[in-house]
Amino acid sequence: MPYWLMKSEPDEFSILDLEKQHQARWDGVRNYQARNFLRAMAEGDLFFFYHSSCAVPAIAGIGRIVRPAYADPTALQPDSPYFDAKASAEKNAWSAVDVAFVERFATPVTLPRLKAEAALAQLPLVQKGSRLSVMPVSPAEWAAVLALR
DNA sequence: GCCAACGTTGGC
DNA sequence: GCCAACGTTGGC
C-alpha cells in the first residue's frame, strides 16, 4: 500500500479541520507532477498531512484516501481561487481526491526535526527549493516519521 | 515582509 | 524549441 505526503496551508485547511469534518475533498492542486501523484493514489492509501506556509511547518497527522482521483470541480468554478479558464466539463486537466481523517499527532513533527532525520534525506519535502505539494513516501520514510511523532 | 527557487507563459 | 519574464511557493 503506497504512502504519500500532501501539503496544506493550515489557515486554509488544517488537520483539525479534517478531524472535525471527518472527510473532505482535497482539491486545488495546480501542478502537473503533484496531480500525477494524486492520480496514482488508491482507496485506502495513507498520507501525512503537512502544514505549510505557517508559524510551525510540520507533519500534523495522517489521513486516508477514500475516493481516488476524479475531475477537480473547482477548476470549473469561476468564483473559486482554483478556477482554470482553460478547463471545461469535457476537458479538465485537474484532479481531486477525497480524504478521511485518521490521526492528529499530539506533537506535530516539525520541519527542522524532519530535516535532521537521515532516513528522510531523499524526501522532496526536505530538499532545498522543492515546492512539490503531493509526493510519495517510502515505507522506510513512513516508519521514520512515525517514530518521531 | 523578504527573497530564493521553482514552474509556467509567451515572444521570437 | 529557447529562454527571459513573470507569478507562486514557502521557509525564515
Image (cartoon, coloured by chain):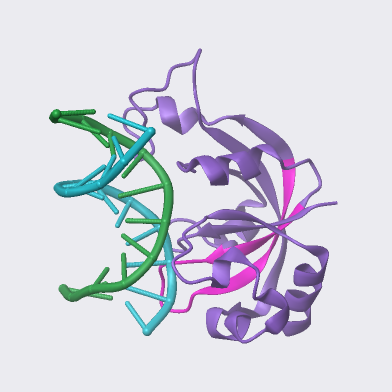
Chain colours: A purple, B green, C cyan
Query: Is A146 left or right of A17, judged from the image as shown?
Result: right
- Evaluate whether residue A149 shows in this view: no
Location of residue C7 with respect to A148 vertically, above or below: above
Secondary structure mostly seen in magenta is strand
Give how far across and how far down residue A95 sits, in percent: 56, 34
Quadrant of res A147: bottom right
Give how far across and how far down residue A18 sits, in percent: 61, 56
Between residue C2 and residue A121, name the one nearer to us.
C2
Query: Is A28 left or right of A69, judged from the image as shown?
Result: left
- Residue at horizontal 38 percent and vertical 27 percent from the top: A77
Quadrant of res A41: top right
Give how far across and how far down residue A45 sits, in percent: 78, 50
Q: Residue furthest top?
A: A90
- Residue at horizontal 42 percent and vertical 22 percent from the top: A87
Location of residue B3 with respect to A80 vertically, above or below: below
Query: Is A37 left or right of A31, judged from the image as shown?
Result: right
Give how far across and how far down residue C2 sits, in percent: 31, 41
Q: Check if residue A64 falls in the magenta segment.
A: yes
Q: Quadrant of the C terminus of chain A?
A: bottom right
Q: Check if residue A144 falls in the magenta segment.
A: no
Q: Which residues are magenta?
A: A46-66
Between residue A17 and residue A84, name the one nearer to us.
A84
- Evaluate whether residue A100 shows in this view: yes
- Residue at horizontal 73 percent and vertical 46 percent from the top: A65
Between residue A93 and residue A105, name the one nearer to us.
A93
Q: How many marks?
A: 0
Location of residue A83 with respect to A21 vertically, above or below: above
